[in-house]
Image (tube, grey):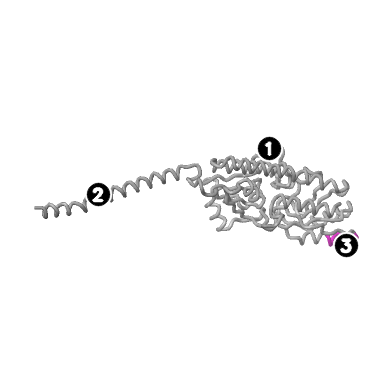
Amino acid sequence: MIQEGHGEHAKRRPRRATTMRWSAMAVVIVLGLFSGFVLLSGPFAGRARAAVQVVATTGMIADAARVVGGEHVNVVGLMGPGVDPHLYKASQGDVRRLAAADIIFYNGLSLEGRMADVLVRMARQKPTVAVSEYIPEELLMEPEAFAGHYDPHIWFDVALWKMAVERIRDGLIEVDPANEEAYRQNAAGYLTDLDELDAYIRSRLAEIPEANRVLVTAHDAFGYFGRAYGMEVVGLQGISTDTEVGLRDIQDLVAFLTERGIKAVFVESSIPRRSLEAVVEGAKSRGHTVTIGGELFSDALGEHGTPEGTYIGMMRHNVDTIVASLK
């Protein structure tokens, strides 16, 4: 009997153990589903400890996002040194990067004109923010030659770029409110640095005699710079490099340089220099000597890891180059 009882008990034990295993598995499944629900319903997809994945179009925007975001963000900039945003088309790799982002920052004002369709599609899926949207319309320039559009080169007026930084700050807070204080502190420090940059620009440009404050560049990107800092600005090409430079454009600029006695013009890192070299030769044929005053960074930053690879460093380089040639 003992043996029989022992045998029956032995037969039941696996069934009880099986029941316990199924119960344990059920608990795990329920907890897993609950955890998944929490992850999906959190303000930042439940990735409180992960960096916010940021994709920015231009180098200036990427640099600001890195400074404001600090350790809480991972920033990918689509357009590297020497890249012209007016002509840039998103590659398949770019589309994948945009799709994997938590937030996308772009300039707006038609700067990234050939990316418009991609950005519209992304805006249906995730926060896609134009950093220019905090700038009041009355502060935007609307050149006649730009067919009724606003000039997108807002970063050349430091006061306007500060508004763009504030929009980046608020965008990061929107997707990652847990780190709001860090974003506000980082932005406040950066805005102070930009105030110092603005003062530096004004101090240096004051060294140029007033009659010499004429900035001639490859394309008309420096309108905001001229308005903010008292420079007359002339570009060989229009606001957008999507337009062609014609022989008439070159002849008109040669006449302007000769009549005004202007001695220096400036090439740009993201624009081929052959058109301005043709201007220099044209002036020479008229007996007027014009030199290339240096290379300016207009629509793209310099190489990563160099001073010109940051917005502040790029602006200081431009001002120092301008002053050295026109002073």
The residue identified by callout 2 is: 19
Give the spatial CA distance, label 1 vs label 3. 46 Å
User: What is the x, y in percent for residue 47?
Assistant: 49, 47
The mark that comes first in sequence, 3 or 2, is 2
Secondary-structure class at tag 2:
helix
Is residue 166 on the magenta stretch? no
Is residue 285 on the magenta stretch? yes
Secondary-structure class at tag 3:
helix
User: What is the x, y in percent for residue 315?
Assistant: 74, 50
The relative height of residue 252 versus residue 230 in the rendered view (above or below) is below
Of badges 1 and 2, the one in the foreground is 2
Answer whether labels 3 and 2 touch (C-beta < 8 Å). Answer: no
The mark that comes first in sequence, 1 or 3, is 1
The residue identified by callout 1 is: 136
The residue identified by callout 3 is: 285
- Quick one: which residue is furthest to the right in this view? 287
Q: Give the magenta part as a residue range.
A: 280-287
